[in-house]
Amino acid sequence: QKRTSRAPDNLVKVETLAEYKDVVGGADRLVVVRFYAPWCKACKAIAPSFYRLAVTYPEVLFVDVPVTPENANLHQGLGVPSLPFGHIYHPFGGLVEEVKISKKHFGAFVRSLKTYTQGSCDLNYLDESHLE
């Protein structure tokens, strides 16, 4: 595993299945994974937001997993349907979120991460008529 240049201390880059299992499987904290391709415009566009998220949540481990000719089977084996794509792993629950993380979907991804870091879910509505 390698630190990416100019990346936060809690962000690592993994390129093999062995590294992935070691980093993600051995973590005792929340892990957020970004699957991306170096040539993908949507992936490049979301990278700064992903890095800012890592700075915002220093207690969370962030993992960058690029697609390379040598590790395409890693993405396929994990069922990554498109890029950029994100996973959130909970230390006790394993994989808890699998979502698209393009600009259009990134806000929902951030809100989802927030529920795990805060240990509670936001109520988006306060209509209690369904309780009557």
Image (cartoon, rainbow, N blue to C red):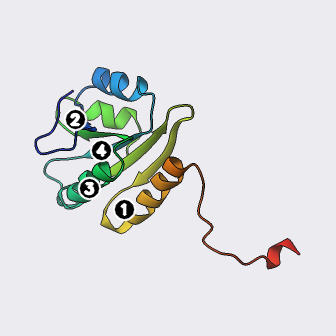
Q: Residue at x 60, y 53 (%)?
A: 120
- Identify the mark at residue 35; answer none if there is no mark: 4
Looking at numbered disc 1 in the image, what kind of residue is underneath it?
Phe
Q: Which residue is mark 2?
A: 13
25 vs 82, left or right, is right
Looking at numbered disc 2 in the image, what kind of residue is underneath it?
Lys
- Extreme-right residue of the structure: 132
Q: Position of residue 57 (x, y in %)?
A: 36, 48
Q: Residue at x 45, y 34 (%)?
A: 29
The quarter holding residue 121 reads bottom right
The quarter holding residue 77 reads top left
Q: Which residue is mark 1?
A: 106
Disc 3, disc 2: CB below 8 Å?
A: no
103 vs 47, left or right, is right
Disc 2, disc 4: CB below 8 Å?
A: no
Sequence-wise, the earlier of marks 1 and 4 is 4
Of discs 3 and 2, which sits in the foreground?
Answer: 3
